């Protein structure tokens, strides 16, 4: 049973560019959340998708957007990249919303130069 | 808003020593509480959880008890091993309508030496 998978593993972009990160949830899970983890910090919640809709959003600008597909996989898009967007981006899936633990993928390391 | 406060690291212990990592939280309602562990270069792995007051979560020798009266969820292990070296994150799950997000502490790095 595959866990949460993310692609790519690493990514290098320059300021002003756009990036798309991808996530496939754990088998049977229908809810996907995205987190940003800056170096030396705890993960910060970006948003959560359920039934192809954004259900909750953290304190991130509109440059951060997402999408969930009918197969429950998800994308995170970041436009107009800033140096401060350099971080580990973590995807987590859960067995529907509610009091269920979230399982994390290995993350995508984004470096903005 | 919700928040989680963890003791600052790094925590350096000798193998077989007793471990305590303090975690306190601020939240409205009745959150679920979690400990996650992150090994170098990897994502987060769920270590243990507790969903209501006085629940004790346990896994791989680690334990934590949900203390509502002190708003705490301290992580303990009786005898640490070198392989326990990692960063440990305390987190709470906030249930709002149809969504639930995790709020994390800043993490505590544990280094265990022989």
Image (cartoon, rainbow, N blue to C red):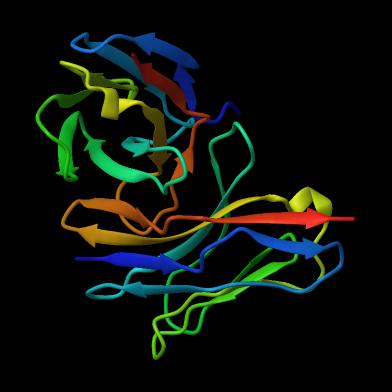
Could you say which quadrant of the image residue A60 lies in?
top left
Residue visible at 30% across and 65% down in the picture: B3
* In the depicted structure, whether residue B40 falls above or below residue B30: above
B41, B113: nearer the viewer: B113
Pick whichever, A54 or A61, lies toward us. Answer: A61
Question: Viewed as shown, does residue A17 lie left or right of B8?
Answer: left
Residue A8 in sight from this viewpoint:
no
Residue lying at 83% horizontally and 57% vertically, measured from the top left: B81
Q: Residue at x 20, y 25 (%)?
A: A66
Left or right, B12 with reference to B69: right
Quarter containing the N terminus of chain B: bottom left
Q: In the image, residue B30 lies at what x, y percent?
A: 30, 75
Where residue B59 appears, x then y in whole percent? 68, 62
Q: Residue at x 46, y 21 (%)?
A: A6
Q: x and y percent of residue B48 in the render?
A: 58, 61
Q: Is residue A75 above or below residue A41?
A: above
Q: Which picture quadrant has residue B104? A: bottom left
Q: Quadrant of the C terminus of chain B?
A: bottom right
Q: Report whether B86 appears left or right of B106.
A: right
Horizontal and vertical percent for residue A85? Answer: 28, 27
Most distant residue in the bottom direction = B69
Please state the total of marks drawn on the protein image. Answer: 0
Compared with B50, A32 (above or below) is: above
């Amino acid at each position: 049973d595959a866990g949460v998978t993310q692609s790519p593993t690493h990514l290098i972009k320059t300021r002003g560019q756009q990036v798309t990160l991808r996530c496939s949830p754990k088998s049977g899970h229908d809810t996907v959340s995205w987190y940003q983890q800056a170096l030396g910090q705890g993960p910060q919640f970006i948003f959560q998708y359920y039934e192809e809709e954004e259900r909750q959003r953290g304190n991130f600008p509109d440059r951060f957007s997402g999408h969930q597909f009918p197969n429950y996989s998800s994308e995170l898009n970041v436009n107009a990249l800033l140096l401060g967007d350099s971080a580990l981006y973590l995807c987590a899936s859960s067995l529907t919303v509610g009091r269920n633990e979230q399982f994390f993928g290995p993350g995508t390391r984004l470096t903005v130069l | 808003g919700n928040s989680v406060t963890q003791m600052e690291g790094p925590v350096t212990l000798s193998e077989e020593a007793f471990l305590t990592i303090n975690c306190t939280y601020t939240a409205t309602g009745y959150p679920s509480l979690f400990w996650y562990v992150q090994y170098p270069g990897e994502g987060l792995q769920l270590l243990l959880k507790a969903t209501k007051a006085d629940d004790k979560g346990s896994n791989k020798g680690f334990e934590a008890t949900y203390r509502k009266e002190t708003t705490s969820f301290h992580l303990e292990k009786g005898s640490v091993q070198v392989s326990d070296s990692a960063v440990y994150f305390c987190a709470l799950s906030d249930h709002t309508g149809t969504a639930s997000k995790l709020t994390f502490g800043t993490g505590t790095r544990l280094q265990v030496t022989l």
